[in-house]
Amino acid sequence: MYMMSDKFVEQLLFKYFSGDAVSEEQRVILEWLKESEEHRELYRECSEKWALQQMPGIAENKTKMHFRILNQLITRQEKHRRRILLNMRRFAAVFVLVTAVGVSVLMFSCKQLPAGSDRCWYAETSVPNGSRSKIILPDGSIVWLNAGSRLKYKNDFGEVERTVFLEGEALFEIQSDSQNYFRIKTEEIDVVVTGTVFTVKAYPNDPLVEMTLIEGEIRAEHTATKQTTSMLPNQQLVYEKTSGKVTLHNVDASKYAGWVTGKIYFADETFEVIAKQLERIYDIEIIIRSEKLKTEKLYGSFDKASGIEHILRLIDVHNQFKWTFTNQTLTISNK
């Protein structure tokens, strides 16, 4: 490989940590890491520098602009595949998307009212691991569901109230209606909005619930205590299930919506937590037989299309671990 100055390397690494490096630049970084232990040590130092620079997050206007560009790109990719469903009074128009990101498979069920009624009490959409899908609700609001997620809502959605029930992770773009608030219910936290753009991450088996506001304003309400927290753009609320602790901090909110287009982003998270995310994304089981790796905190941004092994090679910059695949099971251990 041609020689690169330390300044150029730092600039390239910071671009990579920020999620802006293209696939060719990611390949260059990987080859550079293989060359020496000195390179891997510089990678670690730059990672720590970058992490310290992330508070506060990028300015609100820049985040809004990035999200709008992202949303326009999605719209262009799928426009020629979209079918308009005429009857949207009681049900969502559910799309099975075939785009550059692959096929998203949805499972749609209809729960019946008592006494043999042929009317549905609620509609439910589930997205299996390895997929992500888009739903348009009867009021025109847009919901992107991430892998391993489920969304349901009552048959009379929008007539009296706008309420949905979420398990998993979703990005919401809510149609404004000041007379009829939109409520997202999870097991621990509810979100109340009029019209805005934000993400909610509330998987049943995860220790945390996360809400990240991209645009507008929302109010988070604790289900048990009814304690509320108001949020502004580029803020993230984190709720710890075991302790009940709620924290609010500044982030670059657009990065937490990157999964919609196949971006994988994590910051200051242990690999044990990251592994759960990778399991859902790639529809695999990950067994970690290294206590050191479980607790190691990592930073990074990747394309899903790069594959799980590419991500593992970049995480293992010090060449400490080995991994094997058996069927759909990935086992990672110390060398």
Image (cartoon, rainbow, N blue to C red):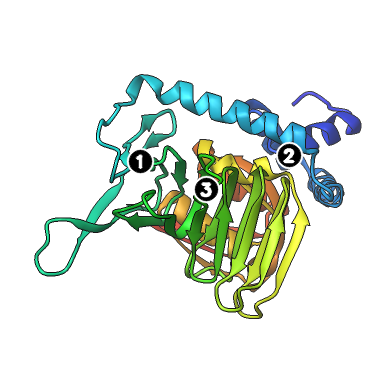
> In the rendered image, which quarter is residue 253 located in?
top right
Pick the front one: 277 or 132: 132
> In the rendered image, which quarter is residue 230 located in?
bottom right
Whole-percent x, y for residue 224 in the image: 56, 78
Q: CB of mark 1 within 8 Å of CB of mark 3? A: no
Q: Amino acid at mark 3?
A: Gln
> In the rendered image, which quarter is residue 126 located in?
bottom left
Q: Quadrant of the C terminus?
A: bottom right
Determine the residue positioned at 65% across, 77% down: 244
User: Eyeballing the image, is 294 above or below 214?
Assistant: below
Whole-percent x, y for residue 149 in the image: 42, 56
The residue where tag 1 is placed is 104
- Label 1 and label 2: CA atoms lie apart by 27 Å
Q: Residues within 10 Å of mark 3 (few under 14, many from 20)?
A: few
User: Eyeballing the image, is 66 above or below 54?
Assistant: above
- Label 1 and label 3: CA atoms lie apart by 34 Å
User: Eyeballing the image, is 20 above or below 249?
Assistant: above
- Label 2 and label 3: CA atoms lie apart by 39 Å
Q: Quadrant of the N terminus?
A: top right
Is any atom of residue 323 visible in this view? Answer: no
State which tag comes first along the sequence, 1 or 2: 2
User: Eyeballing the image, is 320 above or below 262?
Assistant: below
The residue where tag 2 is placed is 18
The residue where tag 3 is placed is 179
58 vs 109, left or right, is right
Name the mark nearer the viewer: 1 or 2: 1
Determine the residue positioned at 59% across, 43% down: 196
